Image (spheres, helix red, strand yellow):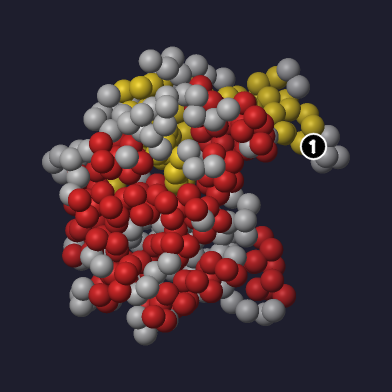
Amino acid sequence: MMSEELPILVEVTRGAIVESRHRGAIVAVEPDGTIAAQLGDGDLITSTRSTIKPFQAIPFVTSGGADHFGVSERELALVCASHEGEPFHVERVAGLLARADLDESALRCGAHAPYNADAARQLERNGLPFTQLHNNCSGKHTGMLLTAVHRRLELDDYYKAEHPIQREIISVLRRMADLEGDIPTAIDGCSAPTFGVALRSLALAFARLANPQAASLDAEVAVASTRIVHAMIAHPEMVGGTKRFDSDLMRIARGKLVCKIGAEAVYGIGVIPCERYPRGLGIALKIEDGSYRGLGPTVIETLGQLGVLTESEQAELAAYYRPDVDNRLGLKVGEVRAVFDLHVR
């Protein structure tokens, strides 16, 4: 449920005129649930969408499936990805499936054109169709399939909420996010389950992902979380692409954080324990209208105000932080800018 009183996070200007505004909410918590900063409604319920891919990968590791199939760190990052459908993504997904004697037809994520424009044009030039391998969620689905193969479970319905794989995923998410009672469940764009979760709970899950030792998690889940975080940070191009916000943010942050975007402009960040946040930190935010235009400025401004990103690191991310508004002649006529104060505690 969206609040009618969410604060303005981002303005879009044309000269001195403010043309548009994006409202939303931000919450940052420590692994024990202590709030470090909040703006707007921390209890705002939002669909998790692809932000939870790192958590959906945990059973792949804890089941022994990742080790059984000899999954590399780079490939584990791909299992957590919303990738661009570039050739190196597609080839890796196909290779993982082949290790279980499966091919693209086993996936149930659906087909769409690569998000990467060059990859999409190359397919068209070659007269080739896009397939489920190009789906940005194909890595996640492959991880689920390989887990099912390893555990000798049914494959055809691996993506349905009642399947043991999906029940294990929601069990892990419950523990990571301290979720109780009934959780609203819906069908994601790739047909896997998505969940209605409060921003505060999503932030808590990311805090524990970044520092599982600070929470009373099962040892296997803690080890899996650390392994997944290391994989994503080490191979950000697999999580997104050669030019993608998630990937560029992790590259510029240089090991300080792990992050994951979700559809409709929901975002999760885990800050690795550091001098300022010795127990780590989890951040979740949502742009109310689902606009990605407001997402980059909000994420980068949040990380700046929290002292996670330096000014020079923010400057390296300028294309996402303060993107220009251009006209048809290529003239800069405005900008997209963050306009909020987090009141960090």
In the rendered structure, the answer to whether residue 112 lies left or right of residue 218 reads right
Q: Give the x, y percent position of residue 33.
A: 25, 28
* Quarter where residue 196 is shown: top left
* Quarter where residue 154 is shown: bottom left
* Quarter where residue 126 is shown: bottom right
Q: Residue at x 19, y 58 (%)?
A: 167
Instruction: Name the kind of residue labelled 1 in the image.
Output: Asn
Image quadrant occupied by the N terminus: top left
Q: Residue at x 18, y 49 (%)?
A: 218
Instruction: Give the camera-side residue of 170 and 55.
Output: 55
Q: Residue at x 32, y 31 (%)?
A: 279
Residue at the disc numbered 1: 327
Q: Residue furthest front?
A: 275
Q: Give the x, y percent position of residue 42.
A: 33, 26
Image quadrant occupied by the C terminus: top left
From this view, report whether residue 210 is shown above or below residue 334.
below
Q: Residue furthest bottom?
A: 101
From this view, report whether residue 284 is shown above or below residue 251.
above
Q: Residue at x 43, y 62 (%)?
A: 73
Q: Give the x, y percent position of residue 297.
A: 58, 31
From this view, report whether residue 85 is shown above or below residue 186.
below
